[in-house]
Amino acid sequence: MGGSFAFGVGSTSDQNTISGYLSKSENNYLNLSGSAHIGFQELISIFSNINLIDNIEEIIFISGINDLYLSNFFETYYPDTFYFNSEFITNMNNQRNDFRKK
């Protein structure tokens, strides 16, 4: 779980990502991180997938830098400040308005 760093953005190859290093061990790992994700999006990802994953022994979070950056440069909005926040809010409002019309 995490943002761009955990996702592997900027790495020279898949083998040089955190997931790449973890895959060399005897354990199985699933990377649920995403580019530009913040803590709220990471929670959505884990809660959306938790029932699909059997025998979870560990969850590794490498997170926080995007939350820190956004909280210092933008006002906080519900559900949280995240990249493309305005598009998310616009689409949610459009969906709500479409639902009310039915």
Image (cartoon, helix red, strand yellow):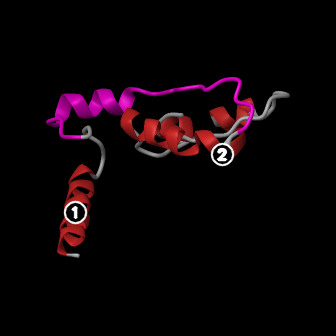
Using the rendered view, name the quadrant where residue 29 is placed.
top right
Q: Amino acid at mark 2?
A: Leu
For the point 54% across and 35% down, the residue is 6
For the point 59% across and 25% down, the residue is 60
Using the rendered view, name the quadrant where residue 70 is placed.
top left
For the point 68% across and 44% down, the residue is 14
Q: Main secondary structure of the magenta part?
A: loop
Label 2 packing within 10 angstroms: few (<14), some (14-19), many (20+):
few
Residue 12 visible here:
no
Circle 1 — which element? helix
Residue 79 visible here:
yes
Label 1 packing within 10 angstroms: few (<14), some (14-19), many (20+):
few
Give whichever of 94, 68 is nearer the camera. 94
Tell me the quarter of the image containing the C terminus. Answer: bottom left
Give whichever of 72, 61 is nearer the camera. 61
Q: Is residue 63 above or below residue 13?
A: above
> Horizontal and vertical percent for residue 31?
62, 40
Asked if the residue under mark 2 is in contact with the one under mark 1, i.e. CB atoms within 8 Å, the reply is no
